[in-house]
Image (cartoon, rainbow, N blue to C red):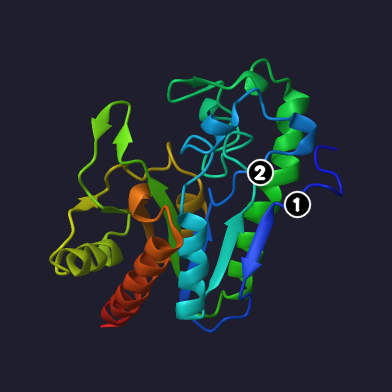
Amino acid sequence: MLLTAEDPFPVRVLRQTAPSDIFLTADHAGRVIPKALGDLGVSETERQRHIAWDIGIAGVTEHLSGLLDATAVLQTYSRLVIDCNRHPSWPSAMPEISEHTPIPGNVGLTPADRTQRIDAIFTPYHNRIAALLDERAKRRTILVAMHSFTPCFKGESRAMQVGILFDQDVTLARIMIDLLRNEGDLIVGENAPYALAPDSDYSVPTHAVKRGLPHLEIEIRQDLIADPAGQKAWAERFARLLMAASRALQG
C-alpha cells in the first residue's frame, strides 16, 4: 500500500452540496509526495516549481468556491507522483523528466509501482469527481477545470495573463474569452498556452465532454497568483465573469 495513516487523503471536496451550477476541479492543486516515495530524488527548490504543481491555483479555487458557493474537488498530491490530468498509460503521467529536470524516483517503475500510484491517488480523485457529477445528473452543471501556467516555459516568455481552453463545445469558451477581452486589461489565450485535446488531457474529456457538459479549462499565469492577494483578486474576477458567462449560456 502506497499511502499510510501519515499521508493525507488524495482528494479534498469543498461545499459538496453547494447550489451553484459551476463545478470546479483542480487536478494539480497539491505538491505532497507520499512518505514512502521520499522526495523522488528531486530537491525542495525544484519541487516548489511548476513541474510539481500548479502554483497558486489551490488558493484561487478555494476563494472561487466560496464566492460562487460552488462545489470544488482538489487533488492533494504532486503531479510528479502521478499527473491526474493524464491517462495513467501515458509516459507524461509519471514522467522520468519534467521540462529539463530529471525525476529519479520515476525511473524504472514496475507495473506494480505504477498500479500503486493509480490506485492510491488517481482513481480516488477521478471516482470522487464522477460520483459527485452523478449526484448532480438532473441539475444544470458547468465544469470548470482550474490550472495555472508559467510566465516562461523552456526559455519562451508568455505575455498572456490568462488562457481559456476547450475541446469540442466552443460555446461557453467563446463567451468567456469575449468577457475576458472586454475587461480591457488582459491578453487572453484561446486554447493557449496549451490546447485541450483527448490525447493530451484527461479530466475535461472524461468528465465533461463524455457527459455532454458545458466546460472550460482556465489557465492563469502563475506570477499573478503566487500570493494570497493575487489569488483573491483573480477569484473575484472569475466569480463575476463565470456568473455572467453562465447567464449568457442560458440565453
Could you tell me the amino acid type at mark 2? Val
Q: Which residue is mark 2?
A: 32
Residue 39: percent from left, percent from top: 68, 30
Which residue does the image show at 25% across and 52% down from the upper left?
161
Q: Which amino acid, mark 1?
A: Pro
Residue nearest the viewer, comparing 145 with 161: 161
Mark 1 to mark 2 CA distance (whole Å): 8 Å
In percent of width and height, residue 213 lies at 43, 66
Quadrant location of residue 12? bottom right
Residue 227 quadrant: bottom left
Give above or below for 97 relative to 84.
Answer: above
Element marked by disc 2 = loop
Q: Earlier in the sequence, mark 1 or mark 2?
A: 1
Q: Residues within 10 Å of mark 1 (few under 14, many from 20)?
A: some
**Vertical relation: 199 (above or below) 211:** above
Across and down, in percent, residue 97 comes to 51, 21
- The residue carrying mark 1 is 8
Name the quarter where the C terminus is drawn.
bottom left
Left or right: 155 as drawn, with respect to 81: left
Residue shown at the point (58%, 22%) measured from the top left: 103
Answer yes or no: is residue 210 visible: no
Q: Residues within 10 Å of mark 2 (few under 14, many from 20)?
A: many
| Image quarter in which the N terminus is found | top right
Q: Which residue corresponds to the image point at 27% horizontal and 59% vertical from the top-left?
A: 170
In the foreground, 207 or 150 = 150
Q: Do tag 1 and tag 2 residues touch (Cβ < 8 Å)?
A: yes
Q: Position of residue 150 (x, y in %)?
A: 35, 41
Residue 61 seen in the figure: yes
Could you tell me which secondary element the residue under label 1 belongs to? loop
